[in-house]
């Protein structure tokens, strides 16, 4: 944002920002277009990101992570967004899955899984959504029934980020089908040795085309009882609720990065493009539209920074997290729409990044809990 610097930034974080930015420009940006055509990036890119120290930035060094905080995670996510890199599902891997394991895993689980997630040997996914169940997590139909010293998992999931690459999947399942919230548990499926586990197709989507998003099928998959997250079954719904503020803040960070990039690309374009004998930037409408976009992006950034500081202090509440998610996702869509308009016909062409950014933005209002659910959560606090 021009000369605005987030109040939580430090010299160490600035160095990480530079390193992450350079890494994405070098390793990812040249290939994003091809990977979008393929619908997936090569599996080894996870290992590259691990070697560069960009996975599990906010996990303690004792478990193979970089020992940072959510501020470190945020810097990496922001730089990924600024580089317009859509292929790497690191927000889910490092920002969500690793933190379920860190928060609820036993010492043995943390030592077994986290170091391998940090190197990219294990890729994480979280399997919540089902063909008939999105925001209403209490209604999941996937079951995990206890037989002897193992769970037998049955069901199907869809829209799963990292679905083709993931080999460590946190599955939201009903351990007690008669209960609602208290019947839900989180069970970690290690897919490499899971008989009865299969992946459906890599789904074709409106946006985020370089990122693998899949259906997953569980047919009598046997999972050791020791793979339950938490000391006892029935904690899953509450575990999910506790982690959602961070997930929603991640969406806000991504929205800020996208808005900043869109404004920068559009400003460059309108200064060069001529119409009626002068640059488009010289028209008052262009300047006013960009002034509005810049202001809204800045407000979003300041709000996200405020939430980030509260999150670092351990007091980002559910209501505020819902606000940051719906507002930033909404503004991202509005700002990119205004920017695309200033590109005219070229904005509709895929060779211009703004076109893909427009398509990519749309899901931000849907995942992490729809914006309608966010407003419902906010309204409950009134």
Image: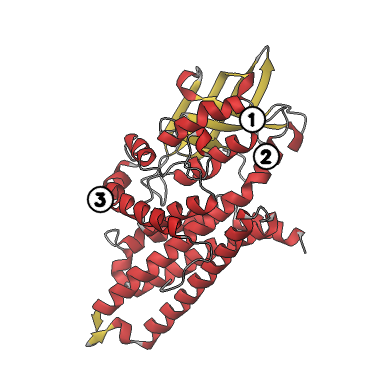
Q: Quadrant of residue 84?
A: bottom left
**Residue at horizontal 67 percent and vertical 45 percent from the top:** 242
- Residue 148 visible in rendering: yes
Query: Which mark, residue 243?
Result: none
Instruction: Give the alpha-carbon distance from disc 1 to disc 3, as whole Å.
Output: 39 Å
Q: Residues within 10 Å of mark 1 (few under 14, many from 20)?
A: many
Q: Secondary structure at mark 1?
A: loop
Query: Which mark, residue 30?
Result: 3
Q: Quadrant of the N terminus?
A: bottom left
| Pointer 1 residue | 229
Image side of residue 264 versus residue 143, left or right: left
Mark 2 or mark 3, earlier in chain = 3
Nearer the observer, 59 or 141 = 59
Asked if the residue at tag 1 contacts the one at tag 2, i.e. Cβ–Cβ closer than 8 Å, the answer is yes
**Residue at horizontal 68 percent and vertical 18 percent from the top:** 146
Instruction: Give the alpha-carbon distance from disc 2 to disc 3, as whole Å.
Output: 39 Å
- Residue 180 visible in rendering: no
Query: Which mark, residue 239?
Result: 2
**Residue at horizontal 30 percent and vertical 48 percent from the top:** 28
Nearer the observer, 244 or 121 = 121
């Amino acid at each position: 944002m021009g000369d605005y610097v987030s109040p939580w930034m430090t010299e160490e974080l600035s160095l990480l920002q530079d390193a992450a930015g350079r890494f994405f420009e070098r390793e990812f940006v040249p290939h994003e277009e091809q990977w979008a055509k393929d619908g997936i990036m090569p599996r080894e890119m996870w290992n590259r990101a691990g070697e560069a120290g960009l996975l599990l930035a906010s996990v303690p060094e004792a478990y193979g992570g970089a020992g940072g905080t959510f501020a470190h995670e945020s810097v990496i996510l922001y730089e990924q967004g600024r580089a317009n890199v859509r292929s790497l599902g690191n927000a889910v891997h490092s920002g969500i899955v690793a933190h379920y394991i860190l928060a609820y895993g036993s010492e043995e689980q943390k030592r077994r899984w986290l170091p391998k997630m940090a190197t990219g040997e294990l890729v994480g996914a979280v399997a919540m959504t089902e063909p008939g169940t999105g925001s209403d997590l209490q209604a999941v139909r996937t079951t995990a029934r206890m037989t002897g010293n193992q769970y037998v998992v049955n069901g199907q999931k869809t829209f799963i980020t990292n679905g083709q690459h993931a080999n460590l999947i946190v599955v939201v399942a009903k351990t007690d089908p008669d209960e609602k919230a208290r019947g839900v548990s989180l069970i970690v499926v290690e897919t490499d040795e899971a008989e009865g586990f299969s992946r459906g197709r890599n789904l074709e989507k409106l946006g985020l085309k370089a990122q693998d998003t899949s259906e997953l099928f569980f047919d009598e998959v046997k999972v050791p009882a020791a793979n339950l997250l938490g000391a006892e079954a029935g904690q899953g719904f509450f575990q999910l609720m506790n982690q959602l503020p961070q997930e929603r803040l991640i969406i806000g960070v991504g929205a800020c990065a996208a808005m900043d990039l869109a404004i920068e690309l559009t400003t460059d374009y309108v200064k060069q493009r001529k119409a009626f004998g002068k640059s488009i930037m010289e028209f008052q409408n262009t300047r006013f539209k960009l002034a509005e976009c810049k202001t809204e992006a800045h407000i979003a950034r300041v709000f996200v920074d405020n939430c980030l500081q509260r999150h670092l202090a351990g007091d980002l509440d559910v209501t505020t997290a819902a606000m940051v998610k719906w507002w930033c996702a909404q503004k991202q869509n509005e700002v990119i729409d205004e920017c695309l308009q200033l590109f005219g016909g070229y904005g509709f062409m895929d060779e211009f990044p703004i076109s893909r950014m427009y398509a990519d933005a749309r899901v931000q209002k849907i995942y992490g809990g729809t914006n309608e659910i966010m407003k419902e959560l906010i309204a409950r606090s009134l």
